[in-house]
Image (tube, grey):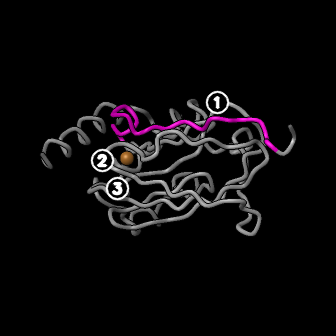
Amino acid sequence: MRSFRITAFAAALTASALMPLASLQAAPGHSGGQVGEPGKKAEAGRTLTVMLEDNFYEPERITVVAGETVRFVIKNKGEFLHEFNIGTPEMHAAHQKEMAMMAEHGMLTPTGIDKNAMAKMDHSMKHDDPNSVLVEPGKSAEIVWKFTNAGTIEFACNIPGHYEAGMVGTFQFRSNPSKK
Ligand SMILES: [Cu+2]
């Protein structure tokens, strides 16, 4: 089972490794403005725990209100490295190309992050965007995020093969009950 998954990872890498590095740097994956902005922990009205599994999220649907700040506690319960990334489908598609390149350069392995390899890359490849976090198996992380306006926003894992395998969830916006 394990070798099957690693083979799938490698196959996804091979398929995407044809993307030249130069084209990645123009990718629009780093703009967080349309999906919200980093929030302040003190302004978070609630804390939500999201489990990362192989290869899906629990829960897969999160309801939010435009304007609210949510503190996400993200726990990797799986055997493989996973990401929690807040973005539009277009942002995720762009980020998948970057992640494939990171994997190709040895910065990502199926189970972890090679910090030495990561440190050698320039800023555009360092995976330090505030809307995203990579979580190794058994570890947890936090993102505090302010949802500024409603839109088509997903949380997704852009590690090669995972989004396609179903590791994507949706944010559903509802109107603010205090404004009724
Ligand atoms: Cu994943």
Q: Could you give the CA–CA distance between mark 2 and mark 3, rounded to whole angstroms?
A: 9 Å
Quadrant housing the C terminus: top right
The type of residue carrying mark 2 is Asp
Between circles 1 and 3, the one closer to the viewer is 1
Q: Is mark 2 within 8 Å of ligand 1?
A: yes
Mark 3 neighbour density, 10 Å: few (under 14) some (14–19) many (20 or more): many
The residue to which callout 3 is attached is: 81
Mark 2 neighbour density, 10 Å: few (under 14) some (14–19) many (20 or more): some
Residue 83 is situated, as x and y percent measured from the top left of the image, at 45, 51
The residue to which callout 1 is attached is: 152
Q: Relative to residue 111, is residue 42 depicted above or below?
A: below
The type of residue carrying mark 1 is Thr
Mark 1 neighbour density, 10 Å: few (under 14) some (14–19) many (20 or more): some
Earlier sequence position, callout 1 versus callout 3:
3
Q: Could you give the CA–CA distance between mark 1 and mark 3, rounded to whole angstroms?
A: 25 Å
Residue 79 is situated, as x and y percent measured from the top left of the image, at 26, 57
Residue span colored magenta: 160-177
